């Protein structure tokens, strides 16, 4: 599990969705959404979130969820450490 610095780049693994309305959400271990990282159209099946500021969040385990067309496409686990 990668440790993530408070300001970082988050690469998303390939998820097979192109040119569809998508959201990338950060959720905590309890499943509550803590941050909306991206909302818009993803034009390739590999996407990188650049310069994400997570400095206001507590240290812990979070999940990055990609949602396209109302369905969860992929979920990645990250560990935030300060």
Image (tube, rainbow, N blue to C red):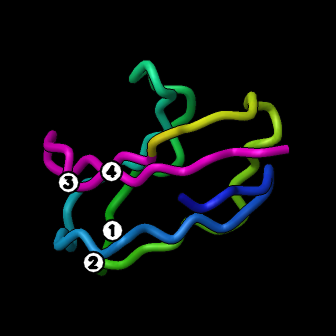
**Res 69 label:** none
Rendered location of residue 29, percent (x, y) = 47, 26
* Residue with the mark numbered 4: 75
- Residue at 36 percent of width and 46 percent of height: 65
Q: Residue at x 73, y 43 (%)?
A: 54
Q: Magenta segment, which residues?
A: 64-82
Q: Distance from label 2 to label 4 (Cα)?
A: 14 Å
Check whether the beta carbons of the residues at disc 3 and disc 4 lie within 8 A of each other: no
For label 2, the crowd category at 10 Å Cα-Cα, with few meaning under 14, some 14 to 19 and many 20 or more, is few
Asked if the residue under mark 1 is in contact with the one under mark 2, i.e. CB atoms within 8 Å, the reply is yes
Q: Return the mark for residue 73.
A: 3
Is 42 positioned to the left or the right of 4 in the image?
left
Residue at 53% of width from left, 58% of height from top?
1
The numbered disc on residue 45 is: 2
Residue holding disc 1: 42
Q: Main secondary structure of the magenta part?
A: strand
* Position of residue 38 in the picture relative to residue 43 (left or right): right
């Amino acid at each position: 599990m990668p440790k993530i610095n408070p300001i970082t780049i988050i690469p998303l693994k390939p998820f097979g969705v192109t040119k569809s309305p998508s959201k990338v959400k950060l959720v905590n271990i309890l499943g509550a959404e803590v941050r909306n990282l991206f909302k818009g159209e993803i034009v390739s099946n590999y996407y990188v979130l650049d310069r994400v500021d997570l400095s206001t969040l507590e240290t812990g385990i979070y999940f990055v969820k990609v949602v396209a067309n109302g369905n969860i496409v992929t979920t990645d686990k990250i560990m935030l450490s300060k």
